[in-house]
Amino acid sequence: MDIFLVGLSLIIIGWLVQLYKLFKGDKGIQPVFLVLYVVGVGLLVYSDAVVGITTNVIFQLGTLVGGLLVLIKLLMDK
């Protein structure tokens, strides 16, 4: 399977985890969601960097940093 598809799959699984927890009544951001999201975006960054799509890499790095900052803050508050 292409690394790009693995990254997208991890992001989708992360969102499904977040949605499941939301339906269970937990309205907080789930650390599992953030880990899957950050790893998935990291794979997208790598995949696009290898191909040479620099515009995508720049925007994806922004989302990667944002996700990491939220994860760090969430873990520090526990």
Image (cartoon, grey):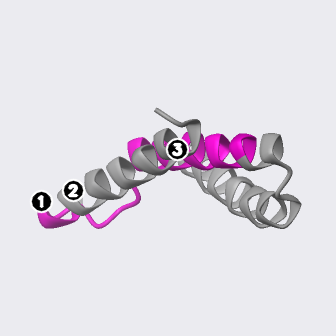
Q: Secondary structure at mark 3?
A: helix
User: Of residues 77 and 52, which is closer to you in this image?
Assistant: 52
Q: Contact (CB < 8 A) between labels 2 and 1?
A: yes
State how far apart marks 3 and 2 are (Cα): 21 Å
Q: Where does residue 43 sit, x and y in percent of width and height?
A: 63, 40
Find residue 21 and report its horizontal and vertical position in percent.
21, 56
Disc 1 residue type? Lys
For this rendering, which residue is in front, 55 or 22?
Answer: 55
Q: Nearer the viewer, residue 61 or 78?
A: 61
Badge number at residue 21: 2
Residue 78 is at least partly visible in this image: no
Does 45 appear in magenta? Answer: yes
State the residue at coordinates (68%, 62%): 63
Checking the image for residue 24, the label placed there is 1
Query: From which residue to which does the magenta span run?
Result: 22-47
Query: What numbered label is drawn on residue 7?
Result: 3
